[in-house]
Image (cartoon, helix red, strand yellow):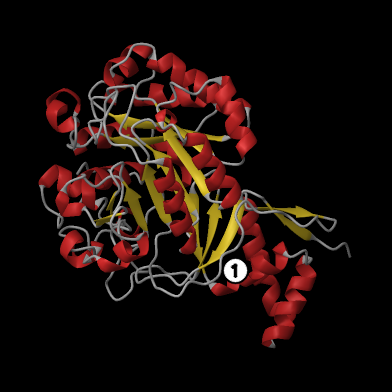
Amino acid sequence: MTELYVTINDRFFFQRLKLPRGFQGNARIHDFYGRRGMEINEDAFEIMDLLDSGNSVTRCIDALAKNYGIDKHNLEPVVQAVVEQGVKIGLMTIERSKPAVRKPVIPQCAQLPRDHFPQEVTLELTGNCNLRCKHCYGSFTPGHGDTLQTAQVLSALDQIKAFHCYDVRLTGGEPFLHPGIWEILDAAVNIHHFYITITTNGTLVTPQIARRLKEIGKMSVHISIDGHTPEINDAFRGVAGAFERAVAALKSLKEEGLGVRINHAVHQGSKDFIAKMWDFADELGIPILMGQVYRMGRCSETANDIHIEPSEFYRAITSVRHRYGERGSHGSNEGSSEGYIRRCDGGWNKIAIRPNGDITPCITYPHIPRFVMGNINEDSIEQIFYGFDRDAMLGCNNAMAIAGCKDCSDVSVCKSGCLAISFAETGRMDRRDSFSCARQRAVSGRPKEP
């Protein structure tokens, strides 16, 4: 009988975690380019670890039977199910010869001593931006004053690494206007081996820049495009030619083999053209993420011109529902822990460092004193992260306690949406994010609009 082996794609890595309340697994698989993560249990983790170590499927079953005293015939369907699911999601392929030892993007991390830690950190490198987007949450402009010094960023990366953080996102303003961007990227990718995502407007990314990014190492680049034509996009982004340069950047990055995604904020000017926006992304062969504008920053000044209502967002997403595929499946609240589903990871498993050194729970939170956890110029990231009062700042973070959410079949998927958007839209933290509700209803095919 021919031995079968499994090769796990280099874009994936595993991490054992001591997860906080509200999570169901105790390990995670991370997809470097697809920006997906999933919690898995210890059994699945051990099977994948054995297969990833060069063992054949048969030897994996033998090892598990020996370790746990379980009949091999009872283990075969369990291992087979893990392999079949892994193949289905692109995690692994089946081979007939022993594969070479792979080099995952990120090395495995040790189990961590605390029950929460920053797994995802966003560095808002600068407020300087060469565009003037109508929806900008930070009201960033050309020459905006605040910029993190390169030494500050490098120190922050050192501190973040001590947490065994794996996911670092660089944004702005426009990150490619930061004078130390190349030194920062080199340290993040080649010294600390972070999973790096750059969010940019793309207008400064030339073929030479794309090639240099590829030379530094593996990373993903997200480019914001807010219309399928130059007329729609450039009117929204405030600078003529922004569309053409962003599209050219997408093509250059894709040609270099980097992970690329389009970010699109649905607004008054684009809400009736979402299918065309998706067609545009498909023609480029690039995935797209649909979000929405919300009343924060410059959008609070221009809301009447660009803001959409949840019902309009529902109709926009419904128009492309069939393209969401399995993302449209219903959720379930059966996995909740004692009636608790943590609504937001901000301040628990992720933080954002703003251009003046302030730390907020995530990049979406308005940069106002109420949501400032501390400042890296005054205290270490560890002191700030473990020293602030989460309950006082974030209020009710249990999706099961939000009116209208407890009995919803999608609550474990939607989790009542984004706390920061709830605050931006209603001024309160104990309300659901109606846009997230609209998205989930649309994607899962629920007929009634919110």
Q: Quadrant of residue 251?
A: top right
Task: Quarter of the image for the C terminus: give it.
Answer: top left
Q: Dot 1, how many residues are within 10 Å of its Cα: few (below 14), some (14-19), or many (20+)?
A: many
Q: Which residue carries the number 1 mark?
A: 45
Q: Residue at x 51, y 18 (%)?
A: 248
* x 29%, y 30%: residue: 266
Residue 161 or 96: which is nearer the viewer?
A: 161
Q: Position of residue 7 (x, y in %)?
A: 73, 55
> Which percent across, then down, holds residue 100?
80, 55
Query: Based on the displayed image, in which of its 4 quarters is residue 97 positioned?
Result: bottom right
> Which x, y percent locates residue 101?
77, 57
Q: Nearer the viewer, residue 11 or 76?
A: 11
Front position in the image: 380 or 70: 380
Q: Is residue 398 above or below residue 34?
A: below
Q: Residue furthest left?
A: 427
For the N terminus, give its image quadrant.
Answer: bottom right
How many numbered circles are shown?
1
Residue 407 appearing in the image: yes
- Kindly identify the amino acid type of the residue bearing the numbered disc 1: Phe
The residue positioned 70% from the left and 72% from the top of the image is 76
Q: Where is residue 232 drawn, in percent x and y?
A: 31, 16
Q: Secondary structure at mark 1?
A: helix
Q: Is residue 70 visible?
A: no
Above/below status of 165 relative to 284: below
Residue at position x 50%, y 24% in the image: 205
**Location of residue 386 (image quadrant):** bottom left
Residue positioned most to the right: 1
